[in-house]
Image: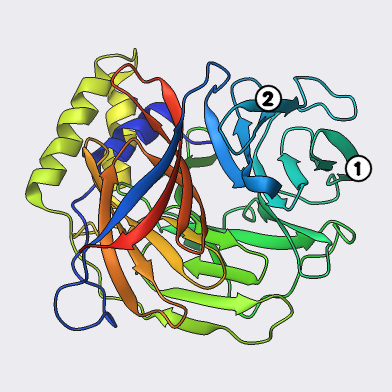
Amino acid sequence: MRYSVGVCLVLGAGGCEPESPEVGARTGAPADLFVDTATVVHSDLLFRVKSVGRIADGGLAVMNQGSRNVLLLDSQGDSAGTIGRLGQGPGDFLSVTDLDTKGDSILVLDALARRLQLFHRTSLVDMWSLREITGTLAQVTFSPDGAPVVSATREPPYPASGDAMKVLREPVELHRVDEPATALETPVEIPGDEYFVVFVAARGGWRYGAPAFSAAATYDLTGAGVVVADARNGGVVSFRWGGQTARTLRPASPPTAVSEAEMDRLWANADTGARRVQDRDNYMTYVREAVEIWGESVPRPFCSVIISDGSETLIRHYAPGASDVAQWSLLGEDGESLGTFSLDSDTQLFSLEDREILGVGKDSLDVEHVIVGRIRGAS
């Protein structure tokens, strides 16, 4: 699937304010939580960090998208070795897409090379080809029986005439690496990114685009199972590996329309973007289609990121691209709201385990640093 890059940038910057309280939350104001930062790791070896995982003896595995490797840190935050480099041989990576850790074992998913590699610290242990899986590889996890499971966003079927100017979702499938050709059965569908199609008679084909204020795929693979949030309606469900039913952690909520100010910001950004391209008319046509796809009212998504340890779940509320602060909610095992906290919008979180969070932040010069923190209640 192809999207117009310029239009996606404009629509992504439109954003929205944090959503109103979700249906099913505890009555009254949610509890105030905060992140107690235990460790901040500064290193010249950090280069576009894509993920961070905990390894044995208090160390960390830091996946660098920029240098196509995994940096190992000891419990003091000092370098303890690296895994991989740019290349196609065993132990090399063409891309680093996702990782999962378990003790000293580290799984590294390479979507471009379409393979998964298992390391015991810096030593390559096993490797699986994923070329039988169609679509775009996204996440990986250790399953309870040890066989890794990966997710892939499958290319949608060729559009039908009834698909024109409708908001559609890319399907997400799960595969065991020892049976990659067969998608796992799941009790609920995992919604992927939103898109829409327009038939262009002059070209005799379809044009793809991302709707304004589009919702992305928000799910997390854990050792216990899968937690899925529908970013469009805010509903959250979970199911265990091999389970036949899903539990509702948070029911769906009615849509909330974006504000007039947000729409004004979107059109202002679109006008700025149109001045940078040669074909201004086509550019603005794409933007108008992305807004008109919704009809009279443009809804805002509810969330943009979900992270879980199989018990508790973190949800990042959807917010404007230009926002300085991101709001997070912590849900309990049964979906109860345990509280909220805010972080700098540039801070990305990758892992939650027993209230410990792992992520990456940036300073005023956009220099990255790894963050180890713990979620605590406000005193």
| Quadrant of image for the N terminus | top right
In the image, taking residue 14 as reference, residue 359 lies left or right, namely: right
Structural crowding at the residue carrying mark 1, measured as other residues with C-alpha within 10 Å and reported as few (<14), some (14–19) or many (≥20) = some
Residue 152 appears in the rendering: yes
Of residues 54 and 93, the one nearer the viewer is 54
Count of all numbered marks drawn on residues in the image = 2
**Amino acid type, residue under disc 2 in the picture:** Arg
Residue 12 place in picture, x, y as percent: 33, 39
In the image, taking residue 261 as reference, residue 97 lies left or right, namely: right
Residue 202 place in picture, x, y as percent: 48, 33
Residue 369 place in picture, x, y as percent: 44, 28
**Amino acid type, residue under disc 1 in the picture:** Val
Of residues 189 and 378, the one nearer the viewer is 378
Looking at the rendered structure, which numbered label has been put on residue 125? 1
Indicate the secondary structure of the residue bearing disc 1: strand
In the image, taking residue 277 as reference, residue 240 lies left or right, namely: right
Q: CA distance from mark 2 to mark 1?
A: 19 Å
Residue 91, by quadrant, is top right
Structural crowding at the residue carrying mark 2, measured as other residues with C-alpha within 10 Å and reported as few (<14), some (14–19) or many (≥20) = many
Q: Nearer the viewer, mark 2 or mark 1?
A: 1
Q: Is residue 183 above or below residue 197?
A: below
Q: Which residue is mark 2?
A: 68
- The residue positioned 11% from the left and 53% from the top of the image is 259
